[in-house]
Image (tube, rainbow, N blue to C red):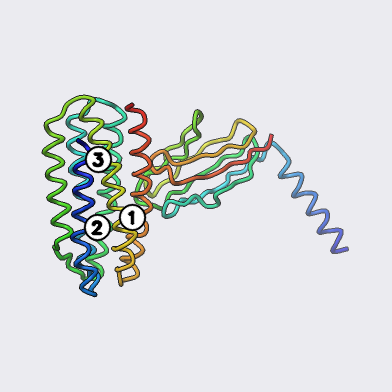
Amino acid sequence: MRAAALSLLGSLALALVASPALAATIEVTIDRLVYSPASVEARVGDTIEWVNKDVIAHTATVKGGWEVMIPPKSKGRITLSRAGAVDYFCRLHPNMKGHLNVAP
Amino acid sequence: MFIRPTAALAAFLLVSAAPLAEAAEKPTDPQIAHIAYTAGVLDIEAAKLAIKKSKTKEVVDFAKDMERDHEAVNKQALDLVKKLKVKPEDNATSQALTKAAKDERAKLAKLKGTAFDKAYIENEVAYHKQVNGALETLLIPSASNAELKSLLETGLKIFQGHEQHAEHVAGTLK
């Protein structure tokens, strides 16, 4: 009985996640020049929100692609419109590196 | 010709750092705070010169990034020394850095256009390399206060980022 309820809950959760109408916002923290988590699994339509705890500005930049400015003690965000895997970095401090896996 | 100030700076850092290390007394926290703060101030001064003189957007943008980042880090450093009640103490390394930077600024002031851009950026690469070397091998290992050490470690990461950023800008000037 309990197992059945759990399984029902499980499929419900799965259905919610799979629903394109319910795009998620995924938070990536920047603390002392580290993106955390460094690698993120997302879907097209999801939003990545970078929360910058540092006192200096950073970016999330994809070479030949998009760039998000993330001011000090502030946030920056982008809604993912394309599937695929991308590496990104901070243009101002290129020793900072992150990765996004975007499922269709 | 742009190599010389770098070599001079390296020599100054090594020469001035060596007596401190040999004296069994590594630099003290008040001296370390002074060196780190001074290194930031000197890069801000170089940035201000570049913002005034350069007409190349990438170079001016880079200089503005340096000015902003080093001001932010130095503000943190000031807040920390105030909190720790540490009074930064002038020392031979700070003085050598200041003298080398003053000479470099005098050289840069005479240059124009592309020659200025290249000399400024190349010096930024070399300067950050030197300061990062000093942070890694001398200042961070010598710092005794944990909060000061942590601030220096974050500073090192930021300045390593600056070094790579400067290298990237240098690549665009060729």
Q: Can the viewer see residue B29 in this picture?
A: no
Amino acid marked by disc 3: Asn
* Residue A82, x across and y down, in percent: 62, 31
CB atoms at circles 2 and 3 under 8 Å apart?
no
Q: Distance from label 1 to label 3 (Cα)?
A: 19 Å
Whether residue B67 is situated above or below residue A37 in the rendered picture: above
Mark closer to the chain start, 2 or 3: 2
Label 2, on which residue? B36
CB atoms at circles 2 and 1 under 8 Å apart?
yes
Label 2, secondary structure: give it.
Answer: helix
Label 3, secondary structure: give it.
Answer: helix
Question: Could you tell me which chain the residue with mark 3 belongs to?
Answer: B
Assess disc 1: are there few (<14), some (14-19) or many (≥20) residues with their C-alpha within 10 Å of its C-alpha.
Answer: many
Q: Distance from label 2 to label 3 (Cα)?
A: 18 Å
Amino acid marked by disc 1: Gly
Assess disc 3: are there few (<14), some (14-19) or many (≥20) residues with their C-alpha within 10 Å of its C-alpha.
Answer: many
Label 3, on which residue? B123
Whether residue B143 is situated above or below residue A63 in the rendered picture: below
Which residue shows up at 64% across the image and 38% down it?
A102
* Residue A17, x across and y down, in percent: 71, 44
Direction right: furthest residue = A1
Label 1, on which residue? B155
- The answer to whether residue A95 is left or right of residue A16 is left
* Residue B65, x across and y down, in percent: 30, 40
Assess disc 2: are there few (<14), some (14-19) or many (≥20) residues with their C-alpha within 10 Å of its C-alpha.
Answer: many
Same-chain check, marks 2 and 3: yes
Between marks 2 and 3 in the image, the one whose residue lies nearer the viewer: 3
Label 1, secondary structure: give it.
Answer: helix
Which residue shows up at 20% across the image and 68% down it?
B20
Q: In which quadrant is the N terminus of chain A drawn?
A: bottom right
Same-chain check, marks 2 and 1: yes
Whether residue B149 is situated above or below residue B42 in the rendered picture: below
